[in-house]
């Protein structure tokens, strides 16, 4: 991976000390941390509880000021409002308004980013479908389980289509299906949308699956940093995988290695599947058998505004901005769309009236070009006919 001239996130000598009432240093949360996160990579921030991960994230977001050192996000201070508009953040705990429902929550965050109303509605619908909450969109957030709260929290972090996505424990409270969907989404946003993602998680298997580089913190200091494959590789061992061999062949290979290399074979085992893969396969088979479940629904397809190309997205935003600057029709506001024309409804009423008169006169009805999708309510039709006749009676 080729690093860009200016990293998306850069910290030099970053230090944060918390002090007591008398300004005495109480806790040194982050100690001289150097950090570079390049564009278009998934970067993992690891460490045990109290190692300084959350404090570092809060300084990246401009929520905390560093005691010493400097920090830049997109080459600017993290307190810059323009920088914040390009960041999506999922905190460790989803602090959402518990009396709003999911749709209202996403609409609220969309308003904070000043997303035009038609585009905001489109994104809300797509995000709810993507995180599997379309069927629970009218429930209050306070009634959600922790896993459902994480799903809606992820949706709000994506409402502004951010260039930098910061995820703090994104899979906490999710079942294995939801965890796999979150990891697939992270990989999609990185590989297809070329987004930069900072992932902080205690679930090391999740980090191993999606991150390209990681740093390990302990006591506020960086203990290790580098490419995850290089950090995990055991260079003093060699692994060979073949199709199943007979015991006699394995014994012959063992003797050959000892004779040619002077080294011994440490173990010969059959490779095993991951528990996650096994679990997902069992669930997939159960779904194919159409077994009923009352659990959360699986996420849907990726939202179009996340899956579309950057040029298409810019063109869409430009068209929405142009539309918002046009003068609104009389009696409407920029936030209120103009009422639809009433001509189709008038044509339907006139047709119903004409049909009723033909029936009264004994004339055969005109053939309809296509069958009706559903039977009409005759009571409603009779009421429409009666009202139309009353309006026309004075002039006849």
Image (tube, rainbow, N blue to C red):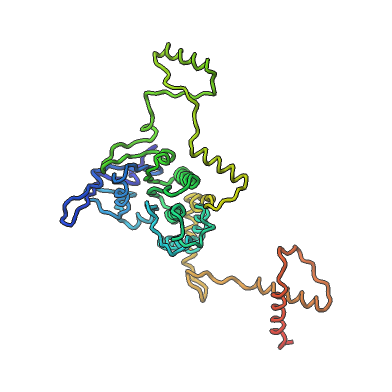
Estimate the x, y position of residue 216 in percent, counting from the top left. Answer: 32, 39
Image quadrant assignment for residue 356: bottom right
Q: Which residue is pictured at 81% across the width and 78% down the height? A: 360
Camera-side residue: 48 or 256?
48
Judge from the rendering whether residue 78 lies leftward or rightward of residue 180; answer left or right: left
**Furthest-bottom residue in view?**
394
When the figure is inspected, residue 320 is found, relative to residue 154, above or below; the finding is below
Image location (x, y in percent) of residue 274: 48, 35
Nearest to the observer: residue 305 or residue 100:
100
Q: Residue at x 49, y 71 (%)?
A: 327
Q: Residue drawn 38% across and 32% down?
A: 232
Q: Position of residue 337 (x, y in %)?
A: 52, 69
Q: Quadrant of the N terminus?
A: top left
Figure quadrant of residue 238: top left
Res. 81 in view: yes
Residue 382 place in picture, x, y as percent? 72, 77
The vertical placement of 11 against 387, above or below, is above
């Amino acid at each position: 991976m080729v690093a860009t001239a200016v990293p998306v996130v850069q910290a030099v000598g970053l230090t944060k000390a918390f002090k007591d009432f008398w300004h005495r240093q109480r806790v040194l949360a982050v100690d001289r941390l150097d950090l570079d996160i390049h564009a278009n990579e998934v970067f993992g921030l690891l460490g045990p509880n109290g190692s300084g991960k959350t404090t570092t994230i809060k300084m990246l977001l401009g929520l905390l000021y560093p005691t010493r050192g400097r920090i830049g996000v997109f080459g600017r201070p993290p307190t810059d409002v323009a920088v914040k508009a390009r960041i999506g953040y999922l905190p460790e705990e989803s602090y959402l308004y518990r009396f709003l429902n999911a749709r209202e929550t996403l609409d609220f965050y969309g308003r904070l980013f000043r997303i035009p109303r038609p585009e905001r509605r489109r994104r809300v619908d797509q995000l709810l479908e993507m995180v599997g909450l379309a069927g629970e969109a009218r429930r209050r957030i306070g009634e959600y389980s922790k896993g459902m709260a994480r799903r809606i929290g992820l949706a709000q972090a994506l409402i502004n289509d951010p260039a930098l996505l910061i995820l703090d424990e994104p899979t906490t409270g999710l079942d294995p299906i939801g965890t796999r969907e979150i990891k697939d989404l992270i990989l999609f946003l990185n590989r297809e949308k070329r987004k930069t993602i900072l992932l902080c998680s205690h679930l090391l298997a999740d980090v191993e699956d999606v991150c390209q580089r990681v740093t390990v913190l302990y006591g506020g200091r960086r203990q290790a940093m580098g490419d995850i494959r290089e950090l995990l590789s055991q260079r003093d061992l060699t692994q060979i995988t073949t199709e199943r061999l007979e015991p006699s062949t394995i014994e012959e290979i063992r003797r050959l290695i000892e004779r040619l290399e002077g080294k011994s074979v440490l173990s010969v085992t059959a490779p095993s599947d991951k528990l996650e893969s096994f679990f997902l396969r069992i669930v997939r088979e159960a779904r194919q058998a159409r077994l009923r479940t009352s659990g959360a629904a699986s996420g849907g397809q990726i939202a179009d505004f996340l899956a579309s190309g950057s040029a298409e997205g810019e063109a869409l935003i430009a068209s929405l901005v142009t539309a918002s600057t046009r003068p609104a029709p009389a009696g409407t506001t920029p936030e209120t769309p103009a009422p639809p024309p009433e001509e189709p409804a008038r044509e339907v009423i006139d047709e119903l009236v004409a049909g009723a008169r033909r029936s009264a006169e004994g004339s055969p009805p005109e053939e309809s070009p296509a069958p009706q999708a559903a039977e009409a309510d005759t009571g409603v039709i009779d009421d429409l006919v009666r009202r139309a006749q009353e309006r026309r009676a004075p002039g006849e």
